[in-house]
Image (cartoon, rainbow, N blue to C red):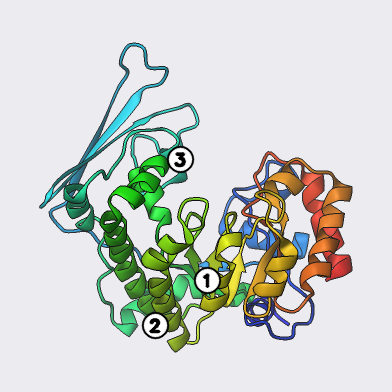
Amino acid sequence: MTPRERILAALRRQEVDYAPCLPFFWSSPTVPEYAWTNEEDRLDLHLNRLGVDAFVSFGVGLERHPDVTERTWEEHPPGEPYPLLHKVIATPAGELTYTVRRTEDWPHGTDIPLMSDFVVSRQIKPWIENQRDMDCFEHCWQPPRDRTDAELAQAIAPTRAVADRWQVPIRAAVGTGLTTALSLFGAENAVLLSVDEPDLIDRLAEIEHRATMKRIELCARAGVDFLSRNGFYETTDFWSPAQIDRFLVARLRRELDLAHEFDLPVAYTVCTGIMPMLEQLKSLAFDCLFSIEPVLGDQDMSAVARELAPVSCIWGGLSAPMDIGEGTPEGVRAAVREFYGTFGRIGTILLAGPSIRPQWPWENVMAMIDEWQKQR
């Protein structure tokens, strides 16, 4: 099978020539002989040098109201360990403001994006605190404009050329759901607001859902092969099962149904906090569940296999921070064997989730791949 055929068959829990391994790297490895500098190098590393599978990505961005403007500035008040970076986004409904500590490892230069894991832990003033702020945000998070089929074909053509050359599938990342809430509110504020002002969370979920539905349609019409939907922070680490029912389940089902109208499989990202929501995930029956954490968070992989593997491909297997980051080659090999012993080889894709960081021991990465080749 080609990588494209193998990955799509695995996502649909169909027979494969062998169970694929498709790792995620946070960035290029620091080991010089395995580093990449561009997309062609990355694909060559995956497919030819490591012998694992890969995909390429295509996306359709969001829109914002044409009158939205923004400005940023920096100051370093006395007593602050780091400079403070401020941003104001002016909208027809008013101004959104944000303040963050600019630490040495701040990756966004002089900008503050609406969505980034880096902003949450450095936040001083969040983007959204009330409904007035949400009025402003809605002008910044609008569904993408419609495109003709010819426009979509032109937009995806460069990605398709690479995908065809390497025989890999095209993925589109569509939707961030309540993962968005952590960046916009801050983690603690998001949880408190979900109790004190649930209508605010519900409104955010609806704004994001409308944008996601349009992105699904456009990416499908462009001709992508599968979709990924970010639910990383949509679990019971933050929300109760009842809140997940209220804010998410119906919207997730509509998104999944729309993707299936175009015959597109959907991989849904969840990591920790899934045990109290197994029945909800089972009922939704995503084609694939991506990056379930097998070590941290007291998650029961035998229960996951029993409840979820019959309806969803499992794209995971190893804990990237524990098995790759802090483990040993022997431990990594044992984890690979345990994954296949628990989940089998149909409807599985091996991954150290959520991603492999460049500073972690490379010998553990090679042990994962070598053991996969023996077990696949």
| Of pointers 3 and 2, the one earlier in the residue sequence | 3
Write down the quadrant of residue 32 in the picture: top right
Residue highlighted by disc 2: 221
> Where 111 sits versus 302, above or below?
above
Q: Is residue 204 left or right of residue 252?
A: left
- The amino acid beneath tag 2 is Arg
Question: Residue drawn at (46%, 57%), measured in percent from left and top?
Answer: 240
Picture coordinates of residue 51 (x, y %)?
A: 77, 65
Marks 1 and 3, Cα distance to the nearest angstrom? 30 Å
Q: Residue furthest top?
A: 78
Helix, strand or loop at mark 2: helix
For the residue carrying disc 3, how many other residues have a C-alpha within 10 Å: few (<14), some (14-19), or many (20+)? some
Residue highlighted by disc 1: 280
- The amino acid beneath tag 3 is Phe
Helix, strand or loop at mark 3: helix
Q: Is residue 286 left or right of residue 16?
A: left
Write down the quadrant of residue 163 in the picture: bottom right
